[in-house]
Image (tube, rainbow, N blue to C red):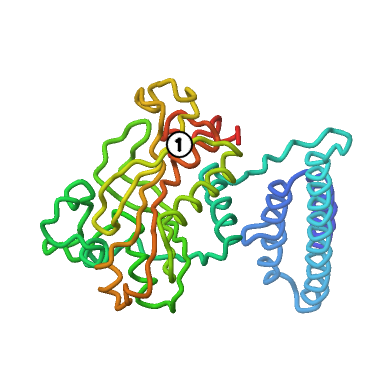
């Protein structure tokens, strides 16, 4: 039995040291040290030995088991080191190869235009406000002098959240006028940008979701001349000195008198094209003197204070600023288009 143990030790060490993978090493362990292994079989036969031989053979068997377990552990470490070395060689980085260019994003053209507008108005002493897109119909219409059934509610009718039409997606940023008048001390100079929603059909200059920038001034002695002078200054700072504008009479329930301001079409230079629908001009904003009734509903004395307000379409501002022919390009997120700015 002693000779058997010595033979098993020699054979097992040879197999263990020759193993080139964890699988081969595990097979060797099972063959010699497993429950049905060769060393285990010998230990089970020790009952046939005499009382004098049993402890001697048992000690030798334990020494063989310990030596084999150590050999397996050493071989396992060597295989792990070899696998790591092979992995490091396979994943080696050639530092002489030119690196891949990292693509860095940038601001969307519409938000470039918005930041420029904010900067212009902040420089004039205006405060920038933010307001909710989900608005009360009372603030979106009633407090702006457009009671239930008013004709102006048809063309600016928007998306409601309940059958009683009390909560809605705002159709304009004008409710921020009311919120400012209710919470701020006079005099007031604010601009309020944000998303608005209307049932407009999609075309080159319209979308059911778009952005507006609301502006308002309330102070003593404010006139229409202040409004026109401010808007012309803003447009020239956005588009350059000598930018051509025109003011047309219009009607808004919350301003009196009211007007719309157009800028000459950037695509055709005023000749007429599909972008401006042949008119040579693109409507940029609506404006006017705040209706006295709107001021009075906010508790403002119209014998002392007056004001003006405007709402400018941010997408159209960006279109004129970057000479974009179709508003839909702004929302399509085509990288080929956006990378031009």
Viewer-closest of 201 and 116: 116
To which quarter of the image does residue 105 belong? top right
Horizontal relation, residue 336 to residue 248: left or right: right
Q: Quadrant of the N terminus?
A: bottom right
Does 332 sit left or right of 45 as displayed?
left
x, y percentage for residue 11? 81, 49
Find disc 1 in the rendering and name its residue: 263
Q: Residue furthest right?
A: 96
Q: Is residue 272 above or below residue 337?
A: above
Residue 301 rendering spot, x and y as whole percentages = 32, 77
Element type at marker 1? Answer: strand
- Disc 1 residue crowd, few under 14, some 14–19, many 20+, Cα 10 Å: many
The residue lying at 85 percent from left, 37 percent from top is 94
Q: Is residue 234 left or right of residue 103?
A: left
Q: Position of residue 120 (x, y in %)?
A: 58, 55
Rendered position, 80 above or below 269: below
**Image point (59%, 56%), residue name:** 119
The quarter holding residue 108 reads top right
Q: Position of residue 31 (x, y in %)?
A: 68, 53
Asked whether 228 or 268 is in front, the reply is 228
265 versus 272 height, above or below: below
């Amino acid at each position: 039995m002693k000779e058997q143990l010595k033979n098993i030790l020699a054979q097992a060490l040879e197999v263990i040291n020759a193993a080139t993978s964890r699988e081969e090493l595990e097979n060797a362990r099972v063959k010699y040290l497993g429950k049905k292994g060769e060393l285990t079989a010998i230990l089970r036969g020790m009952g046939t030995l005499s009382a004098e031989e049993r402890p001697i053979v048992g000690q030798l068997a334990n020494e063989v088991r310990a030596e084999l377990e150590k050999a397996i552990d050493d071989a396992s470490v060597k295989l792990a080191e070899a696998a790591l070395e092979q992995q490091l060689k396979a994943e080696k980085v050639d530092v002489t190869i030119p690196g891949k260019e990292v693509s860095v994003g940038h601001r969307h053209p519409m938000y470039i235009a918005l930041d420029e507008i904010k900067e212009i108005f902040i420089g004039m002493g205006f405060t920038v406000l933010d307001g909710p897109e989900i608005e009360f119909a009372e603030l979106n219409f009633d407090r702006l002098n457009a009671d239930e059934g008013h004709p102006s509610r048809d063309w600016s009718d928007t998306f409601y959240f309940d059958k009683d039409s009390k909560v809605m997606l705002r159709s304009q940023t004008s409710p921020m006028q009311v919120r400012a008048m209710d919470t701020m001390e006079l005099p007031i100079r604010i601009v309020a940008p944000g998303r608005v929603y209307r049932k407009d059909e999609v075309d080159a200059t319209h979308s059911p979701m778009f952005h507006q920038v609301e502006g308002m001034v309330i102070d003593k002695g404010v006139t229409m001349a202040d409004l026109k002078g401010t808007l012309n200054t803003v447009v020239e700072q956005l588009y350059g000195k000598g930018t051509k504008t025109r003011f047309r009479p219009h009607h808004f329930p919350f301003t009196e008198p009211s007007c719309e301001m157009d800028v000459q079409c950037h695509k055709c230079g005023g000749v007429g094209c599909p972008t401006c629908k042949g008119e040579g001009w693109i409507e940029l904003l609506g404006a006017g003197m705040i209706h006295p009734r709107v001021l009075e509903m906010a508790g403002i004395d119209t014998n002392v204070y007056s004001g003006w307000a405007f709402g400018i379409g941010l997408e159209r501002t960006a279109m004129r600023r970057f000479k974009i022919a179709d508003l839909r390009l702004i929302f399509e997120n085509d990288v080929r288009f956006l990378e031009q700015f």
